[in-house]
Image: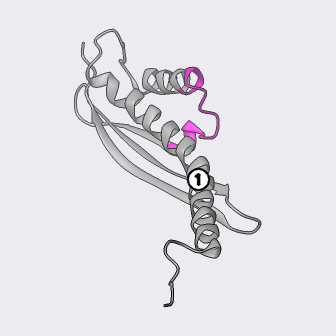
Amino acid sequence: MRHSQKGASFFGWLALIALIIFGLVIAMKLVPIYLDHFAMREMITKVNEDPTIKINSIRDFNKYIEKGLQINSIRDIDPREAIKITASGSNAYTVQIAYEVRTPALQNVDLLVHFDETHIVRPIK
């Protein structure tokens, strides 16, 4: 009577553990990039909801964004290159967030994350 092996072999477990570690390393590289982006997006969309934020011009909006990036410790994004603000009508602004973040993954392999979104912002007066 012959008995066959049940369960995963040593090499099967080794491959599974290697894939899990690879996924965790990639996640450790990508999660901070997305957290910074979500914080920046929240800061911009908060202008629509918070009446205590006083924005009367594009200059005020730029100062607000630079201060928010400093408070949230977002130093990898240059707001002058990544964020374009234009006036659209009376008391409304179009904010375009467009930038890329490149981070090294392995020796000569980089991870590239591209963000491009537009928000219409109407400050509450």
Going by the picture, which residue comes out furthest to the right? 107
Magenta highlight range: 69-82
Give the x, y percent position of residue 11.
64, 75
Count of numbered circles in the view: 1
Q: Is residue 87 above or below residue 3?
A: above
Q: Residue at x 23, y 33 (%)?
A: 89
- Left or right of 69, for residue 59: left
Task: Please check the rendered image and state whether residue 75 is part of the magenta-colored stretch, yes or no.
Answer: yes
Give the x, y percent position of residue 60.
44, 20
Going by the picture, which residue comes out furthest to the front? 1
- Left or right of 125, for residue 67: right
Q: Is residue 83 above or below residue 44?
A: below
Q: Is residue 87 above or below residue 8?
A: above
Q: Residue at x 27, y 24 (%)?
A: 48
For numbered disc 1, what is the local secondary structure?
Answer: helix
Q: Residue at x 28, y 11 (%)?
A: 51
- Left or right of 70, for residue 122: left
- Left or right of 122, for residue 28: right
Give the x, y percent position of residue 63.
51, 22
In the picture, residue 49 is in which quadrant?
top left
Give the x, y percent position of residue 95.
37, 39
Question: Label 1, on which residue?
Answer: 24
- Classify the position of the C terminus by image quarter: top left
